[in-house]
Image (cartoon, rainbow, N blue to C red):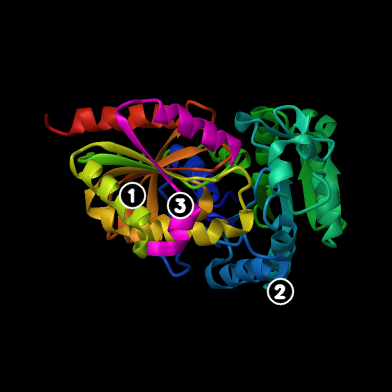
Amino acid sequence: MVPKTWLILADDLTGAADCAIAFSRSGLTAAVTWHPDGPQERVLAIDADSRAHGPKAAAARHRRLIEARHAPGLGLFKKIDSTLRGQPAAELAETIRALRERGERALAIVAPAFPETGRTLENGAIRVHGEPLEATALWARDHSYCTGNVVAVLEGAGLRVQHAPLTVVRAGRPAVERLVRDALSAGMDAVVCDAVIAADLDVVAQATLPQAAHVFWTGSGGLAQALARSMGTSDAAPPGPTEIIGGILFVVGSIAEASRAAAAVLAADETVRRIMIDPAALKAGPADRRWLKALQIVLETLAAGGDVLVEIDPGPNPDLAEGPALARRLAELLRPVAPAIGALFVTGGETALALLDALGANGIRLIEEVEPGVPLGLTRGALAVPVVTKAGAFGDAATLRRCLHYFRRLRQTETPS
């Protein structure tokens, strides 16, 4: 039976949102939270905030969430990064162990491809816009494994893996169903499915949804979209944002090339005030005049209805290990501007979590997707404003500018002149 409610476990906030929005687009109510005791929605995505942790700590966080939130009949989606950042193998292995300890068969259907964002899986290995993952700047900047071959990575974590090559996927639903049945009979832990286009993921979803009592799904937004399409839901869509009153705050914490290029394009718009914050100023805190100056400019601009772009200046040789601490410091700097925010855009999972938490939000009710991998929602908690979150490596150079225009259309439509 196809699940009527879903639990998504993610290793960062932007990933949680870009998976949950797929179900929202199909009519199911969906929300993201970073609080394990939050209310259950038809689709609830929980950020385990495990991306920056080692294998044991990341696995333990997912086990706790399984023990606290999973129940029989609840569809389970384990979100992993489409470029294998973080600890997806350890998290998946621990998820399987935790489920089986509860008496469930728990075969993982693994399909990390997200074709709409250029991520594909061929011969068990990830490719980004056609090139091997290991040859990309993403891999050079941040990787956890010695290979981008998903089958090898999972086998390295001790999992028994069956590969579904593209020839099997392209043979259609019956071929994938047979392979999955065989994997279940053989006591396998995971089936890794190749996919190059969205239709490949549709085949995987259609073949595996009827076996929901015995399997769960592991992937990125592409697989989530395929599952939502295959479910054919018809619930009424949730309402959109009612109004934007005030300035728009863009916060770019990611150092990914896509985010930096998009920030530069947005900064070229003379109507947007750009503020580059030196990491040294963030470390120094409010005692540093640059901290106070940046806060003053952001407050004054937003209060006057203007739009602001805030970035952490990565410098020529950024230290990735400082990322989480800098994100928290930036969130602390921006905490006082919460009452002046009309809408918020934030890129980078660590930055999004730290900032939303600091601003008083405790979740996001998802509404729609501005573009692939870029969901829009309404924050819950003390802060209630439209928010767009984006994974650092998603989008192109014009993504932030398109989001600016999207927000401004809402402001022009909904806010009296």
Residue 42 visible at all:
no
Q: Is residue 258 part of the magenta span, yes or no?
A: yes
Q: Position of residue 400 (x, y in %)?
A: 44, 32
Q: Position of residue 59 (x, y in %)?
A: 68, 67
Q: CA distance from mark 1 to mark 3?
A: 19 Å
Identify residue for label 1.
294
Main SS of residues in magenta: helix
Please tell me which of labels 1 and 3 falls first in the chain. Answer: 1
Describe residue 212's horizontal placement relative to residue 170 as left or right.
left
**Which residue, as the protein is rendered here, is positioned at the far front?**
289
On residue 316, the disc is none
Identify residue for label 3.
352
Residue type at the position of mark 3: Ala
Residue type at the position of mark 2: Glu
Give the magenta part as a residue range: 256-285
Identify residue for label 2.
101
Mark in front: 1 vs 3:
1
**Which residue, as the protein is rendered here, is positioned at the far left?**
417
